[in-house]
Amino acid sequence: MILYYTSSIDLIKGNIMKVNDRVTVKTDGGPRREGVVLEVEQFSEGVMYLVSLENYPAGVWFFNETDSHDGTFVEPLHQ
């Protein structure tokens, strides 16, 4: 099986999802939730994603830290 990831990839900082990518987000105490990226802002410490969720269609901001797996809240949706 060969999988292709079609979003932008920054080989130094890791995967960077783009607007309209389908993602899952980690929230407190519950299962990962599916959403869609509305906006992306890059910073030296990581990347902020505005993600539209079912209960929050206008979006919620999530921050992925550059070098921390525990600080990764937004991931590409693997179907």
Image: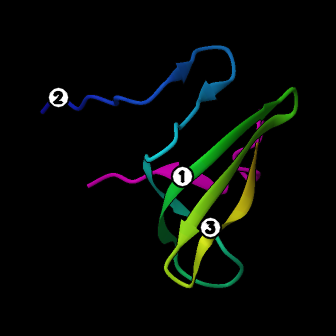
Describe residue 23's horizontal placement relative to residue 48 as left or right: left
State the extent of the magenta-drawn residues as a range: 65-79
Q: CA distance from mark 3 to mark 1?
A: 14 Å
Asked which quadrant contains residue 42, the reply is top right
Seen in the picture, residue 12 relative to 8 is either above or below; the reply is above
Q: Residues within 10 Å of mark 1 (few under 14, many from 20)?
A: many
Q: Position of residue 24 (x, y in %)?
A: 49, 61
Q: Is residue 10 magenta?
A: no
Q: Which residue is mark 1?
A: 37
Helix or strand or loop: what does disc 2 sit on? Answer: loop
Q: Which residue is mark 2?
A: 2
Of residues 31 and 39, which is closer to you in this image?
39
Name the amino acid, label 2.
Ile
Q: Residues within 10 Å of mark 2 (few under 14, many from 20)?
A: few
Tag on residue 9? none
In the displayed orientation, state which residue is furthest to the top: 12
Of residues 51 and 12, which is closer to you in this image?
51
Dominant SS in magenta: loop
Helix or strand or loop: what does disc 3 sit on? Answer: loop
